[in-house]
Image (cartoon, helix red, strand yellow):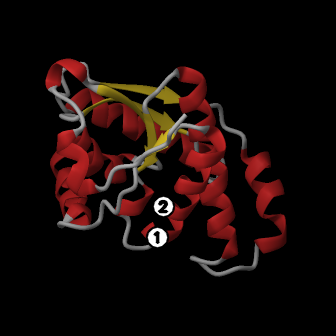
Amino acid sequence: MTVRHLTNDELGKISSPSEQQRLLLHCCCAPCASYVLEYLSPIFKITVLFYNPNIQPHEEYDKRAAELRKLLALCDRSGNVGIHICEYDPACFEIATAMFMDEPEGGRRCRVCFGLRLGETAARAKEGGFDYFSTTLSVSPHKNAAVINEIGGALMGDKGINYLYADFKKRDGYKSSIELSKQFGL
């Protein structure tokens, strides 16, 4: 299988409305998802994957999952966006990052966490017959899009599923996510 990826500039060229490709999109929270879904839903048929074993405590995980469901209920995506909420399982994150618990934000622990979440997304995308996988993580100014895309690209090769490279904070993506979050009361 030949693996290819697209840049944000190429997104509009990949499908016509009658032939939308399927994207499994890892989402960390509703505010980050708001802009990304608005941007990608005209292009892809999207399934949102809420897989975030790094979130603690359990109540916070449930709150973020509920806000993501709320966002999807409030915004009209013409049936083009579905959702899958994974079971809460912080043990895999704790085990994977145990040796990096004292690392600052943006350190090696973040790289391991990105790899854990993107790895699960890639595996599920491959298993589910999706055309692409990606994540909303790059919309945050606190997350390094180059590192996220490097991990996604490596997983694309390992799993044999296309990764959608993106830096969603560009073109005022982060600013738009803040405005949409206010609009939807997230």
Q: Judging from the image, what secondary structure is the residue with disc 2 in?
A: helix
Q: 17 or 143: nearer the eye?
A: 17
- Residue 99, percent across and down? 84, 71
Q: 134 or 55: nearer the eye?
A: 134
Residue 143 appears in view? no
Q: 145 or 181: nearer the eye?
A: 145
Q: Residue 96 bears which disc, if any? A: none
- Image point (73%, 47%), residue name: 90
Verify CB contact (< 8 Å) between mark 2 and mark 1. yes
The count of marks equals: 2
Q: Quadrant of residue 79?
A: top left
Residue 55 vs residue 140: left or right?
Answer: right
Residue 140 vs residue 118: left or right?
Answer: left
Q: Which quadrant holds the N terminus?
A: top right
- Residue 26, percent across and down? 48, 43
- Residue 123, percent across and down? 63, 35
Residue, disc 2? 149
- Above or below residue 28? Residue 138 is below
**Distance from Cα at disc 2 to Cα at disc 1:** 5 Å
Q: Amino acid at mark 1?
A: Ala
Q: How would you rate the neighbour count of disc 2 (Cα within 10 Å): few for under 14, some for 14-19, many for 20 or more?
A: many
Q: Amino acid at mark 2?
A: Asn
Q: How would you rate the neighbour count of disc 1 (Cα within 10 Å): few for under 14, some for 14-19, many for 20 or more?
A: few
Residue, disc 1? 146
> Which residue of the protein is positioned furthest toward the front in this rendering?
2
- Image point (18%, 59%), residue name: 176
- Image point (47%, 37%), residue name: 65
